[in-house]
Image (spheres, rainbow, N blue to C red):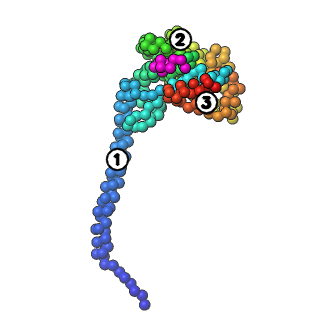
Amino acid sequence: MSLVVSLSSYLYWDYFCQSIPLFAILWLLLFAICCAIFWSVLYYRYSLPHSLRKAIKEEAMDVYFQPIISLNDQKARDMEALIRWKSPYHGQVSPLTIIEIADRLGLIDDLTWMVIRKVGCFYRENSAILEGVSIAVNVDRHSLLEESFIPNLQGILAEYPELKGRLGLEVTETSALNMSDLPIMVSQFERIKALGIELSVDDFGTGYSGLDFLRRFPYDVLKLDRVFVSSFQDDQFTRQILTSVTKLARELNMKVVAEGIEEQEQLDAIKELGVDSVQGYFFSVPLPGDQIIQWLEEKTQK
């Protein structure tokens, strides 16, 4: 004999009706979360350009410095100035995002001038410890083609005479050079060098700067991109390319800097090329002004 217990259908309906408020609350909660995510993304997307424009106008960004080590005497004869920005609303914003948005907003020149002025202030505040140290600032090639570039540069040099003979420009390539721009670029380069400014070709081998590019323009420094440096030990083809490039740079009286050195093995391997200087996390990460001064002081004492 078995006992079967059954519930009337009205009880199921009663349980369902009692659960409706709970389902409604869960649905509203999910809807609120989705709306919050949507509006947060929308807010970030559309307010970041506005915040960046304001930060550039108010010069509210920071400049970090990464030392470049001479293999001749193991001293930091040069440094690279790198932009950093922690937005009060968006947190730490990557340098690539900063440059991309600034370029889209037509503010890339303002960003460059802001960095150069901050480098000028850095020299003025730390003249003793920075004696004999050059600092390079990244500049887009399109900026160099503008007629206003040289007058603006001369104005900043007049405002910060500490920059004379110390400032360097690292030219980045974002597009192929038109033949019509060639004579303008050569003329601009000559005028820049007449101001005592050293010119570097940045990230060589990854953009539009090739061997013919080096022959046409009077660069002082060639910077080998980290992509080549990272594969130099294991890739024979890369080794052959860098050997040829380094030899050409020597023939053109250019100094060679290897970027992206992160391990002792990379440093030992790259020394075989006969490069002049090296740069990378193996020596130091990019540091804010006060910390790089402390770093230089510690190296000087050793």
Q: In this view, does 56 lie above or below 187?
A: below
Quadrant for residue 295, please give it: top right
Please tell me which of labels 1 and 3 falls first in the chain. 1
Tag 2: residue type?
Answer: Gly
**Helix, strand or loop status at disc 1:** helix
- Give me the residue at 51% from left, 17% from top: 127
Quadrant for residue 217, please give it: top right
Q: Nearer the viewer, mark 1 or mark 2?
A: 2
Residue 39: x and y in percent read 34, 43
- Per the model, the C-alpha gap separating discs 2 and 3 is 28 Å
Residue named by callout 2:
196
Furthest toward the front, the residue is 301
> In this picture, which residue range is highlighted in magenta?
119-129
Residue named by callout 1:
36
- Per the model, the C-alpha gap separating discs 1 and 3 is 43 Å
In the image shown, does 288 or 114 lie closer to the viewer?
288
Please tell me which of labels 2 and 3 falls first in the chain. 2
**Helix, strand or loop status at disc 2:** loop
Q: In this view, does 217 lie above or below 263?
A: above
Q: Are marks 1 and 2 in contact (CB under 8 Å)?
A: no
Name the quarter where the N terminus is drawn.
bottom left
Residue named by callout 3:
283
